[in-house]
Image (cartoon, rainbow, N blue to C red):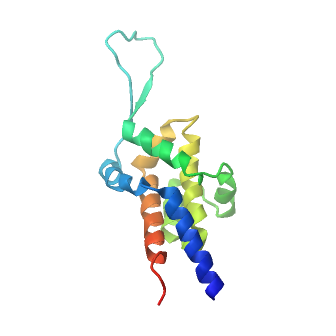
Amino acid sequence: MESENIYRQELVKKYRAAMGNLFRYIPWLEEKSGVKMVHNYSGDNMPDHSVPIPVYDGTLLGFVKEMQGTGLMNRNYVYTFSKYSIRTEKDELAMIDRVELKEIEIVFDIMAKYVLGGMTKGILWSRAVENGVFLLGLKKIKELLDIWDEPLA
């Protein structure tokens, strides 16, 4: 039992250190939930037949960059999606909602789909804000770390 508590404390410490100040984005994500976070550049000298250039919110780009810097974005997130039969955005949100501390990696894997996938398909970053995956993921991680960070009597 004691070794289990030590393991839990080390796990919480590891995730707290990796997440740093990322929880400061929660109010911003709450404000932007459901809002489209990308628009196409339409400058004065933009010809009608040119390729549209997507422009992303600076705060969103900062969040994505910090998430990448945590070292918790698993490039093999597709295996988690397969293992738990996560196929839709609704499945992603439901899975995040029911995760416990021992399964916290699932939340990071779901977020990795959007953070890493957005590197080649930028619309994924906007979609994660619109559908609430980033918000719910951060809230769940914070909730789990806050609950398990309390010392046992």
Q: Camera-side residue: 42 or 148?
A: 148
Q: Where is residue 102 in the image (x, y as percent from the top left)?
A: 60, 73
Relative to residue 11, is residue 64 depicted above or below? above
Relative to residue 136, is residue 149 depicted above or below? below
Q: Position of residue 144 (x, y in %)?
A: 48, 71
Taking the image as drawn, is residue 37 in sight? no
Q: How many labels does the image show?
A: 0
Tell me: 62 left or right of 73: left
Taking the image as drawn, is residue 153 in sight? yes
Tell me: 97 left or right of 57: right
Q: Where is residue 118 in the image (x, y as percent from the top left)?
A: 54, 39
Tell me: 73 left or right of 59: right
Residue shown at 55%/75% (left/top)? Answer: 9
Which quarter of the rendering shows the N terminus? bottom right
Q: Camera-side residue: 47 or 65?
A: 65
Q: Where is residue 5 in the image (x, y as percent from the top left)?
A: 58, 82
Residue shown at 34%/16% (left/top)? Answer: 43
Tell me: 71 left or right of 34: right
Residue shown at 35%/19% (left/top)? Answer: 42
**Occupied quadrant, residue 79:** bottom right
